[in-house]
């Protein structure tokens, strides 16, 4: 690993714990300016206040979220896109390059691949090209790996998720993001199949704060390296306060009960 890549990774991963809290804000392309990200500068301000390690966004809104003051935060530029308006929303296409991300000051780039989709071959080819370019620039790559297609009966199945994670690892990702499989033992199987850090996705907003924090704590117990979660954080009534509780679990080893006590709210 080059010194440049090492330095960039340390901007998005806590060098003491080896874990990370990433908050994706890329939803504007897929579903529009939903609650929590209509004002990108406010969203980033709340996320930084809570102690997140990095934010993830598309190239055009970097200027909207840059605060030019206060504590810094890692920047991951998302290279993939599709919209919910398309008849093929799972078919991701590249809309940015590693070189563009370098010019924007990125600490890492991310790509999204939906295994099982009819356009899987193109997405895998795109990822291969991205990881090749990233090596040349010393740029870390986060791979968002999901199983979505007619042959996928359950995208949360441990074997399916382990396959997704391993594909990301095999194709050169430095961090792999996958869905949580639902329990510690099954997710440990996912983590053990990769030689790079594995973080969990958040998916749709969870029903309870305790359920969300328990998912995070269990994933860390299984050997996971943290989370890359958007809506469950930026759509919370108090994203900054929620992130302090998440930070306590991920980086300080606090229990879910202790984190809930910090929040001072119901379940």
Image (cartoon, rainbow, N blue to C red):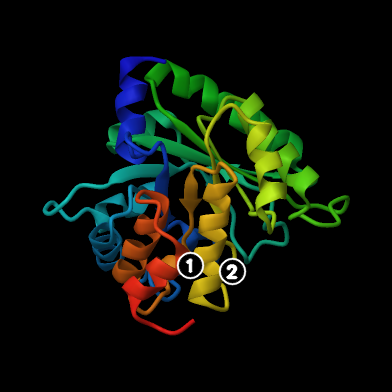
Task: Please say if 60 is above or below 210.
Answer: above
**Which of disc 1 and disc 2 is earlier in sequence?**
2
Residue in front for this viewpoint, 10 or 250: 250
| 193 vs 262, nearest the viewer | 262
Look at the image and tell me in which quarter the N terminus lies.
top left
Residue at position x 31%, y 63% in the image: 244
With respect to residue 125, does 60 lie above or below? below
Residue 22, percent from left and from top: 41, 50
Q: Is residue 58 visible?
A: no
- Residue 227 is situated, as x and y percent measured from the top left of the image, at 48, 51
Q: Residue furthest bottom?
A: 266
Checking the image for residue 204, the label placed there is 2
Which of the two residues, 244 or 60, is positioned nearer the viewer here?
244
Residue 172 position, x and y percent, is: 57, 25
- Give coordinates of residue 217: x percent, y percent: 51, 57
When the figure is inspected, residue 18 is found, relative to residue 34, above or below; the finding is above
Q: Quadrant of residue 203?
A: bottom right
Q: Considering the numbered disc 2 on the image, is that residue within a helix, a strand or a loop?
A: loop
In which image quadrant can residue 109 be found?
top left
Q: Which mark is residue 208?
A: none
Reading the image, the residue beneath label 1 is 231
Q: Is residue 17 visible?
A: yes
Whether the residues at callouts 2 and 1 have beta carbons within 8 Å, the answer is: yes
Residue 202: quarter of image: bottom right
Helix, strand or loop for disc 1: helix
């Amino acid at each position: 690993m080059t010194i440049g890549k090492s330095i960039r990774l340390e901007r998005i991963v806590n060098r003491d714990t080896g874990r990370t809290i990433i908050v994706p804000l890329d939803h504007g392309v897929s579903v529009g300016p939903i609650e929590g990200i209509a004002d990108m500068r406010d969203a980033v301000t709340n996320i930084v206040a809570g102690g997140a390690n990095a934010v993830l966004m598309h190239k055009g809104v970097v200027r909207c979220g840059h605060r030019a003051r206060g504590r810094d935060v890692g920047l991951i530029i998302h290279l993939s896109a599709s919209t919910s308006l398309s008849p093929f929303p799972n078919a991701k296409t590249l809309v940015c390059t590693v070189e563009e991300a370098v010019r924007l000051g990125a600490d890492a780039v991310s790509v999204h691949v939906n295994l099982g989709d009819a356009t899987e071959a193109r997405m895998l080819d795109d990822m291969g090209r991205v990881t090749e370019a990233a090596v040349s620039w010393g740029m870390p790559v986060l791979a968002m790996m999901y199983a979505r297609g007619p042959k996928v009966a359950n995208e949360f199945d441990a074997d399916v998720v382990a396959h997704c994670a391993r594909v990301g690892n095999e194709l050169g990702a430095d961090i792999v993001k996958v869905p949580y499989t639902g329990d510690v033992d099954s997710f440990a199987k996912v983590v053990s199949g990769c030689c790079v850090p594995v973080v969990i996705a958040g998916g749709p907003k969870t029903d309870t704060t305790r359920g969300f924090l328990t998912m995070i704590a269990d994933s860390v117990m299984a050997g996971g390296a943290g989370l890359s979660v958007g809506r469950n954080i930026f759509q919370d009534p108090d994203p900054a306060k929620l992130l302090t509780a998440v930070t306590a679990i991920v980086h300080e080893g606090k229990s879910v009960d202790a984190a809930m006590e910090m929040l001072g709210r119901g379940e």
